[in-house]
Image: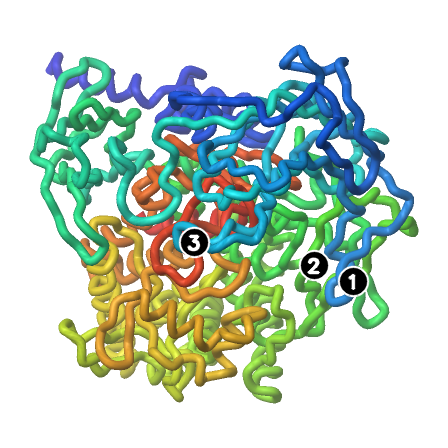
Amino acid sequence: MRKTLFTLFLLSASSISIYGQVRLTQDDQLEKQLHESGLIHQPLPLNTANSFETNGWKKEVLESIPLTQSASTEGWKHSGAGSMSFSTEKTISGKGSIKLQFPTFTGKRATGSPSDPDYATYGNSGVAYNLNGANLEKYNRITFSIYPDCDGARIVNMNLTFINADTPVKKGYNQPSGSHLINLVNKEWNQCFLEIDEYQRDKVMSISFSTALKGKDRTTGDSAVYYLDNLELQTVKNPENVSGWSPADGKIIYSTTGYTVNSPKTAIVNTNTSTYNDKRFQLLDPASGQTVYEGEIKEETTTLGKFGLLDFTSFNRPGVYQLKVNESLTPTFRIGERIWEDSGWKVLNFLFCQRCGYPVPGKHATCHVDLMSKHDGRSISYAGGWHDAGDLSQQTLQTGDVTFSLLEAYNKLKDKNPALAARLREEAEWGLEFVLKNRYGDGYRASSMGLLIWQDGVFNTLDDISSVRVQNMAFDNFLYAGYEAYASMTLTGDPMLQEYLLKTAEEDFTFAMDKFKKDGFDKFIQPYEHSYNTSRSQYMATISWSASQLYRLTKKSYYANIAAEYIRYTLECQRTEPLKDKTGTCGFFYRDKNKQSIVHYIHQSREQVYMQAMNLLCETQPEHPDYPQWARSIRLYGNYLKGLMHYTRPYGMLPSGVYHAEEYKDTTGFYALHLFPPTNAKELYTEQIKNGVKLDKEHYVKRFPVWFNIFNGNTAIHLSTGKSAAICGNFLKDKELLDIGLEQLYWTVGKNPFGQSLIYGEGHNYPQLNTFSSGEMTGEMPVGIRTLGNEDIPYWPQTNNACYKEVWVTSAGKWLSLIAEY
C-alpha cells in the first residue's frame, strides 16, 4: 500500500508544473515560456542553442583569409536607394566597416509587374564587392558580420548573392538561383556564415549584400543603416551534405523530437565509410549514462542504396534518451505517448506570429486595414487571418484550411490537454472570423492578394490597395461550407455563433451547388491561388465531404444523398485494376474519368480529401448500399500507400506516387498542375519520371513530384498523404498505416538525409528559414525539401530562399491536422 501511494505521489508530482498547475508540456523551459507569453499572446523566444547555425559555428576551420583587400570602399559598388560609405563608428574587426544607408520612405507608390502590379516593393538598396572572376573553389564557407542600425525596425534581414561567370556545369548542376536570406537582430552585431560548397565559384564576379524596401510599420523610423564587416573565406571540415540520400559521415539520422511508444523506432547511419567500425549501437539514459538498450547495426540495401539501420522498436519505456554509435552521440530525444503536443504549442506560436490585422508584439502593429476588396459597390478590409508565407500575401481559402486543422487538433486534445486545446480553438476562431467577414452574401468572397509591403493603416493615402481578388467559385464555397459546418459542431459555448455558422454553411453550400449545376466545374482563373490545380476527382470528393459535414450537422437527407451521389464520380476515377508490375500496384486516383493523368501535387496538396470523404461517408451512412464500395476504396488506397513505402526505405517519407509516362498529353490537367511551365515541359517531364523507378512500360514511381519552377517543396505533400494513411489506418484498425503517418512526422523533425528538423525550435538542428516579413519564429515551417534539376533525390542546402525554404502556414496546418490523428 505504501509503495502504491508513493507511486501515485510521483505521478502526481510529475504532472504539476513549476507554477503549481497541471503541466502544459513535457519541457520545463517551454512550460516557463508559455506562461510568460500568456499562453502565446506574445511570441515565444527563439531557442538558437539547438539551431543549425549554432552547430555550424562548432566546425573546425582549416583555413581562412579576408575576402576584401583593403579597409576602405575600394572594390565595393552601391546600387539602388541610399548611399554607401566607409565607417569606423561601428566595427567588429577594428579596421572599419562598409556602411549602407537608405531612407525607409521613397514618396512613391510601390509598383510591380504589369500582371501583378501590387506585388511590389519600394525598391532595393545594396552593395557588391567585385572579385573579377576569382576562383574560390578552395573555400567552402563565407563568414561575415552585420550590424543593422535601423530606427524602429522590428524585422531586419539582408540577402547575400554570389554571381559566377558563365562556365561549364559542375557537379551535375548549375549554381542555384536566387539569394540567401539572412535573418538578423536589430542593433547588435550578427555573426553569420553561409556554406558555399554547392556553388559554382571558379569565376566569381561579385558577392553582394542587399535588402528590399518594404514600407513602414508603426515603429519604423525614417532611415535604415547596415554595417558590414569582417568578411572571410574559410575552408571548414565536414561541410554539410546538401543533396542525396546518404547520411553524412559520422551523423546519426533520427527523429529529433523522439518516437511514439509501441511504434517502429529506427535511425540511420552511413556504413559506407570507415567511421562505423563497431557494428553495434547503444541507447543511453543521459541522466545515468547507462546503456538501456543495445543492438546490432543492420546492413540494409534498398532502392536508394546501402544503409546502416538502428532498430530499437522493441524498447518502449517512456523517457529521455540518446543514441550512440562509436564516438557519435545524438542530442536527447523523448520516447513517450504524447510527444507531439509540445510541437503543437510551437506551431501554434508560428500561426499567432503570422496574424494579419493584429498587433503581434515584437513583430508588427495592426496591419493591412487599408487593403481592400470591392464588389457590387461595397468594400471589405482584407486585414485578418494569417499572412500566407514569408511575404505578406493572404488567401482566404488557405486561412480556411488552417482553421479547419486547428479545430481538428482542438477536438483531439480538448480532453487530453485542455490548455493547449483552448488556445488552438482561440486561434481557429481568429481564422474563422476572416473566412466569415470576407463573404459578400451572394456567393462572392474576397479570395486572395499577393503582397510584399507594410501599409500605413490610413485610408485615402498613397499606399492604399483595393485590388484584392473577389470570386464566386463553387469549389471554394463547397470547402467553406464544410469548414463552417464542422466549426458549428465544434464551437460549443457560443450558441449564437453556432447558429450563424449553420446558416452560412447551408447558404454557401447552396451558392456552390447552384453555380455547379449551372456552369459545371469551375474554370480556375487565378494561378496564384492554391485551388488552381484542382482535379475533377478531387472536386467531386470535396462536394461529397462537404455534404457529409452538413448531413452530420443538420441530419437532412438532402445532404446525405448528395454525398453518396457525388462520390460515385470519384470512385470511377480510382485505379482498381492492378498494374502489370511486380506487386500489382493500384488504388491511386486519376484526375478525371478519362484516366489520362494521375492526381499529383507540386506545392499545395489536398490529397487527404479522398480519404476524408470516404471515411465520413462510412461514418455517417453505415447502412447505405454503397458502403462496401467506400470501404473498398479505403482499403485499396491504404494498400497503395503501403506499397509506395518500399521506394523510400529506410526513410519513411511517402513518395509523390505513381506517374503515367505521357501525362503531358492531358494538356488541361498538365497545365493546371504545372504553373508557368517552360516550353520544353514535355521533355523535362519525361526526363524526371525516368529518374524515378519504372514499374511497367507506362508507369513510374516518383519519390518527389515532377516540378519545373519556383513552386516546389514537399512538406504539404507528404504530410497530406500521411494524413490519408492515418485516416485509412484508423478506419481499418491497421497499425502499419498508422505507422506510415507517424513516419511523416519523424521525417519532418529530422529523420531525413540532412538530419535537420524542419520546425524551428522543435527537436534539434533546425535552420533559419525564409521569413523576410515577420522574422524568425519558433514553430515556423517551410514549404519543404525539394529536388535539384530533373533529379529525384532530396536537395536541402543552407541557401535560404523561396519558395522551398519560405515559411508557410499551409505546412503548419498540415502538421496540426496529422498529429490530430494520434
Q: Residue at x 52, y 27 (%)?
A: 233
Closest to the observer, 311 or 534: 311
- CA gap, disc 1 to disc 2? 8 Å
Mark 1 — residue? 467
- CA gap, disc 2 to disc 3? 26 Å
Q: Secondary structure at mark 3?
A: loop
Q: From what the image shows, is residue 716 above or below residue 291?
A: below
Q: Residue at x 21, y 38 (%)?
A: 269
Please give left or right for residue 353 compared with residue 292 in the image: right
Q: From what the image shows, is residue 220 above or below residue 115?
A: above
For label 1, count other residues whose C-alpha is less than 10 Å away and answer few (under 14), some (14-19) or many (20+).
some
Mark 3 — residue? 786
Place residue 435 in its image quadrant.
Answer: bottom right
Q: Nearer the viewer, mark 2 or mark 3?
A: 3
Q: Are the residues flagged by discs 1 and 2 in contact, CB closer than 8 Å? A: yes
Closest to the observer, 352 or 419: 352
Which numbered disc, 1 or 2, marks the residue that appears first in the sequence?
Answer: 2
The numbered disc on residue 449 is: 2
Q: Are the residues flagged by discs 2 and 3 in contact, CB closer than 8 Å? A: no
Indicate the amino acid at tag 1.
Ser
Q: Is residue 516 visible?
A: yes
Closest to the observer, 357 or 415: 357
